[in-house]
Image (tube, rainbow, N blue to C red):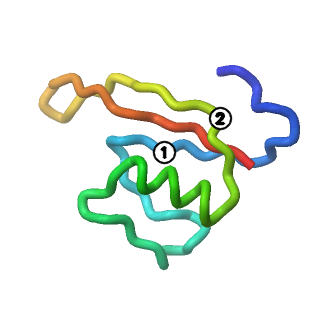
Amino acid sequence: MAPAPTGVQEVIGVSGNVIKQCPHCRGGFSFSDPPDVGERINHFLKQHGYKLLHVGQQTVESSNGDLWQTTVAILGK
């Protein structure tokens, strides 16, 4: 992984296949059900001042061995 851009002190990853509560809202913010990866990215951009550092895709394996393509975003501030 490339080093973070100058001035970035905190990095967070948002993935289309992993659903987590916002660590800054302490459980007070709920995403839609099912949560949209764009909604989660926008939350960090608009509510917490993150900048988008990278968007891409990753391949993950499901519990039954199927391969899934998911979106992944790296944000920093």
Percent from the top left, x then y, of residue 52?
A: 63, 41
Residue 22 placement, left or right of 51: left
Q: What amino acid is labelled 1 in the image? A: Val
Q: Quick one: which residue is furthest to the bottom in this view?
A: 28
Disc 2 packing (10 Å; few <14; some 14–19; many ≥20): some
Disc 1 packing (10 Å; few <14; some 14–19; many ≥20): some
Residues 65 and 39: in front is 39
Question: In the figure, 62 relative to 59: above or below?
Answer: below
Asked whether disc 1 touches disc 2, contact meaning CB atoms under 8 Å apart, the reply is no
Q: CA distance from mark 1 to mark 2?
A: 11 Å
Q: Residue at the location (86% across, 34% down)? A: 6
Task: State the quadrant of the N terminus.
Answer: top right
Q: Earlier in the sequence, mark 1 or mark 2?
A: 1
Percent from the top left, x then y, of residue 31?
A: 37, 65
Mark carried by residue 14: 1
Mark carried by residue 53: 2
Q: Secondary structure at mark 1?
A: strand
Residue 12 placement, left or right of 5: left
Residue 66 placement, left or right of 6: left
Mark carried by residue 60: none
